[in-house]
Image: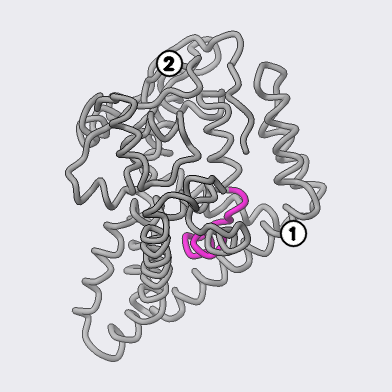
Amino acid sequence: MTDSFIAAPEGAHYRRINRRLFTFHAGGSLVAAFVLPFLVRFGSPLWLWPLLPLGLIANGYWATLHEAVHGQLFPAAEENRRAGRTLAILWGSSFRLLRFGHLMHHRFNRHKLDRPDSFDPATTGPAMARLRFFAEALGGLYVIEVLTPLLYLLPRRQVARIVRALYSGDEAPMPRLRQLAEQTLAGAKGFAEIRQDALLAAGFIAAALVAWGSYWPAFAAFLLGRGLLVSFLDNVYHFRTPLDRVDYAYNLSLPAPLQLLFLNMNMHRVHHRRMQLPWWQLPRQFALDREQFDDSLPRAALRQLRGPAAVAPPQQMAEAAPLS
């Protein structure tokens, strides 16, 4: 936890806001899963409509979970971890998996598993690269986040083999990534936690589908819809950015209400260079660093429809400073 989070004069105010954000997003998921189906089935189908705004704020949900990933949602580490696990389970995934993937994105940005917007023409054809890119951007990333924890229902030895295979290769930074993945994702503690999260997430989704009864497609559409929104914007800040600049990202402008929904994550270059800052300090840092916006987020998002580019990868990937 950073000193700035605790010591800043406005810190207490924003900690209260963070608590409300957590309550709102976690509560919204529970309402969508168990309250609305009761109102729809025993009241009126008009109660289907609240699913729409609850789905459309998916990027705000993810931004709140993102604060927990960086240890900034709550000042106490254990409380922050519990909140992150809760949000991840209600998202359908595991906090440990999501946290590892995101922090490795910061540390080894643009490594071979972290650049869906580009491909090496020496090893991958354009058609396969486009298929993979659009499958991931159009909701596939969310599907991966939901299905991956279920692999932890397999015996631990098999999971360890899968982790090693995923991070195989001798080119930098894969050996270091593989070592960290084995420690974090395949160790006894990590394995047990992810397996527990998988069971809780699967149980939550299954119970919600049962609660919705014959209206279950509406809840499934809600899950997939918010997954689509987050998947499509996941890589927008790095689309076709240099492969050898670990701390680089685009700053993308948004109207003030949407910037608030995104918790200022559109100031993404500032976030990558100063990831220890909580969301509410990013605008101040943006001004202090004399940063500028590279484009608007909607235009950058649409530019992704161009698909991946053929790029020869650099021989070595630089490593950022160690994670705190």
Q: Is residue 21 above or below residue 251?
A: below
* Colour treatment of the image: one colour
Q: Residue at x 53, y 40 (%)?
A: 102
- Disc 2 marks which amino acid? Pro
Q: Nearer the viewer, residue 18 or 311?
A: 18
Crowdedness near tag 1: few (<14), some (14–19) or many (≥20) residues, C-alpha within 10 Å: some
- State the image quarter where residue 58 is shown: bottom left
User: Pointer 1: what residue?
Assistant: 192
Determine the secondary structure under disc 1. helix
Give the side of residue 297 with respect to residue 109, left or right. Answer: left
Q: Nearer the viewer, residue 57 or 200?
A: 57
Q: Residue at x 53, y 46 (%)?
A: 3
- Disc 1 marks which amino acid? Ala
**Quarter of the picture holding the C terminus:** top right
Give the side of residue 159 with respect to residue 250, left or right. Answer: right
- State the image quarter where residue 153 is shown: bottom right
| Residue 196 position within the rendered picture, expressed as x and y whole percent measured from the top left | 67, 64
Highlighted range, magenta: 85-97
Q: Earlier in the sequence, mark 1 or mark 2?
A: 1
User: Pointer 2: what residue?
Assistant: 242
Q: Nearer the viewer, residue 316 or 167?
A: 316
Specify whether residue 69 is painted magenta. Answer: no
Determine the secondary structure under disc 2. loop
| Residue 75 position within the rendered picture, expressed as x and y whole percent measured from the top left | 53, 57
State the predominant SS element of the stretch in magenta: helix
Specify whether residue 89 is painted magenta. Answer: yes
| Residue 159 position within the rendered picture, expressed as x and y whole percent measured from the top left | 74, 47
